[in-house]
Amino acid sequence: MITIGLLHTTIRGDEKLILEAAKKRNIGIKLIDVRDEIFNRKTYKHNFGVALERCVSTVKGTHATHFFESINVRVINNSTIAAICEDKFVTSLVLQKAHVPTPGFAMVFNSPQAIKAVEEMGGFPVVIKPPLGSWGRLLAKINDIDALEAILEHKEVLGSPHQKSFYIQQYVKKPGRDIRTFVIEGETICAIYRDSPHWITNTARGGIASNCPVTKAIASISKKASDAVGGGILSMDIFETDDGLQINEINHTTEFKNSENPTKTSISGAIVEYCIKVAKNQ
Ligand SMILES: Nc1ncnc2c1ncn2[C@@H]1O[C@H](COP(=O)(O)OP(=O)(O)OP(=O)(O)O)[C@@H](O)[C@H]1O
Ligand SMILES: [Mg+2]
């Protein structure tokens, strides 16, 4: 019997769905709460060859991934994919280098450079984001130079070291929604629209999920983006713009529980199937 190590912190509804999907397929799951582990290569014992990283904490998840890779356990997603997707700046660099359409962006470390960067990008509005954030937290849409200076001063004075790196992105006009695709090894298995009257359309911030038909254009940009970051199990935020689709960002440990119903797709089932495939090809 195949056993998959499920690396986790809090067990969310998403992990419960993965457990159910594994049970249905007669796949053993070894639950590993990384907070209870001692990651010492000399003493660590395990009985699985494939691990699925599902930690809510990106930092703990990444450390656990490095540990298991060091003892030759294949981790989904691997540390290379995680290193790209956990940081929005790195994701943008990789996408742009691979010619995947993505909004204009820059990284700066102080206010005068931020003002110049916005000019280079074509002016306001812009969006400032923590490079390592999620759930739409601490996103700021900046409409003018006064707001830009104020936000950056607050970050410089009150922020932690991470918050003193300013990732600036062009603000993209979108039709009251964005698209989230669920992509496994380059294939888009389903997608949702996230509608909201607010410019931040995350479901964590009140956006409403509904099924989004996977068009050729959606499948194609998702495949290109997946190839650029190294495949695996991903979800992507896509903007519909006048110039076509653009990838906003890519998540490597995605929440999906609210997307199974609207899309009528077992995302958890597809995740488990992918883990089985990887385990069999070891
Ligand atoms: N440059 C932009 N232009 C227009 N809208 C944007 C832009 N950046 C972000 N948004 C809106 O804010 C939402 C959250 O942004 P983003 O996905 O970059 O942040 P996040 O905190 O990583 O979210 P997630 O929960 O997906 O990790 C997007 O889904 C989109 O609706
Ligand atoms: Mg997002």
Image (cartoon, rainbow, N blue to C red):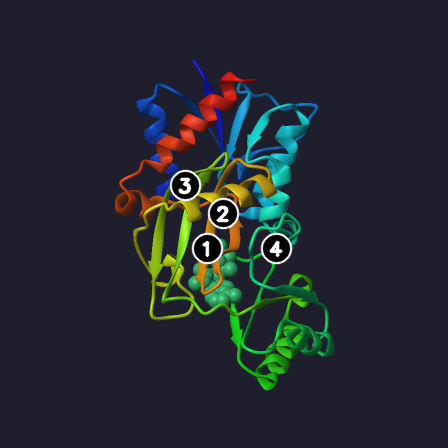
Of callouts 3 and 1, which one flags the residue occurring earlier in the amino acid sequence? 3
Spatial separation of the CA atoms under disc 4 and disc 2: 14 Å
| Residue linked to disc 1 | 238
Secondary structure under the numbered disc 1 in the rendered image: strand
Q: Secondary structure at mark 2?
A: helix
How far apart in space, not on screen, are marks 1 and 2 (Cα)? 9 Å
Q: CA distance from mark 4 to mark 3?
A: 30 Å
The residue that appears at 31% across and 42% down in the rendered structure is 260
Mark 2 or mark 4, which is nearer the start of the sequence? 4
Q: What is the number of the mark on residue 214? A: none
Looking at numbered disc 1 in the image, what kind of residue is underneath it? Ile
The residues bearing labels 1 and 4 have C-alpha atoms spaced at a distance of 13 Å
Could you give the CA–CA distance between mark 3 and mark 1, rounded to whole angstroms? 28 Å
Residue labelled with disc 4: 92
Q: Position of residue 280 (x, y in %)?
A: 50, 17
Q: Quadrant of the C terminus?
A: top right
Q: Mark 4 packing: few (<14 Cα in 10 Å), some, or many (20+)?
A: many
Callout 4: helix, strand or loop? Answer: helix
Q: Which mark is residue 221?
A: 2
